[in-house]
Image (cartoon, rainbow, N blue to C red):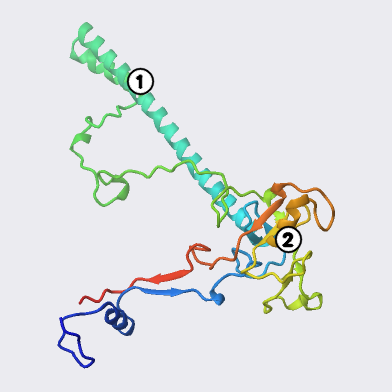
Amino acid sequence: MTRHSKNCTASSVYSYHEKKKDAKASGYGSLNMRYGKDGVKDFDCCSLSLHPCRDPVVTPDGYLFDKESILEYIITKKNEVSRKMKEYEKQCKKERNELAELGEAEQRSQVEKFLNTEAAVASPSQAAQGEKSKVEKITGPSVSNMVAGRDKKLPSFWVPSLTPGNKETKLKKPDKTVYCPISGKQLKAKDLIPVKFTLADASSSSSLEGQRDRYKCPVTGDVLRNNIPCAVLKPTGDVVTMECVKLIQKDMIHPLTGVPLKESDIIELQKGGTGFAAANDHLTGIKARPVLQA
């Protein structure tokens, strides 16, 4: 096959490069775009409000939250569980009442059947009618759907509760456990650990919102950023770099207080996510658009 010239427009070949170029210009095909640094949540921001934490706390898994936001989330979830539990208990009570009514109706029908049988054997039909009226006085009217002309009535197609085949949705017993909104693991208020950041410049503590370099490691003095792995020392809540953690792990002694540490006292702080459903793992946004057919 001969090589195409630059001005050749009669070719039946539609290359991948041409397809991508046309899709970008015409708005067809999936659009991929990588998030920039402005679209990534800072490591010291709350995972719920996405703002710098005023009173930071961290979960045992290393996810940072503002104390006010996470406590409000826990209270909201508990109130929701309480509401669902009341609805579930109401449904259970209704089912118990229905079972009790069915049991009483079955007992009445058995008594009625027994008395009718005895009356038919011992006396003529009039006596049987008299016994039936006595039974109705004692046990009440029959609940059968085949007496008193009830078998001629059709269910209503206009009333939702009487529509044929209408079934009530049964509620499942709600789970009382509150889960972390980021990790999906069980979350308790008592497990939240207070965090203490060391200011990079103590004189500018009033305007942390607009600063990029807000905090530093209290041991090494390195400025903390998203690209620097950090960890929280559980006994005091100080945030240090992972390079400092490597030095701490040699002696397992707190560098600021001298208190012995355990491996569980070092909590790696999770990096700032994108603020979207996929955080840390996928930093690319994909938008599906109509496909351009060749």
- 268 left or right of 169 in image: right
Q: Residue at 25%, 76% (x, y): give it.
A: 292
Residue 153 sits in quarter: top left
Residue farthest front in this picture: 2
- Above or below residue 26? Residue 242 is above
- Above or below residue 47? Residue 139 is above
Q: Decide if residue 67 is in sight here.
A: no
Residue type for callout 1: Gln
Q: Secondary structure at mark 1?
A: helix
- Above or below residue 231? Residue 189 is above
Which quadrant, please, contains the N terminus?
A: bottom left
Q: Residue at 80%, 48% (x, y): give it.
A: 260
Residue 83 position, x and y percent, is 54, 48
Q: Secondary structure at mark 2?
A: helix
In front: mark 2 or mark 1? 2
Q: Decide if residue 258 is in sight here.
A: yes
Residue farthest top in this picture: 122
Marker disc for residue 107 = 1
Q: Which residue is mark 2?
A: 244
Residue 115 position, x and y percent, is 28, 13
Q: Residues within 10 Å of mark 2 (few under 14, many from 20)?
A: some
Question: Is 189 in front, or is 19?
Answer: 19
Residue 100 position, x and y percent, is 42, 28
Residue type for callout 2: Cys
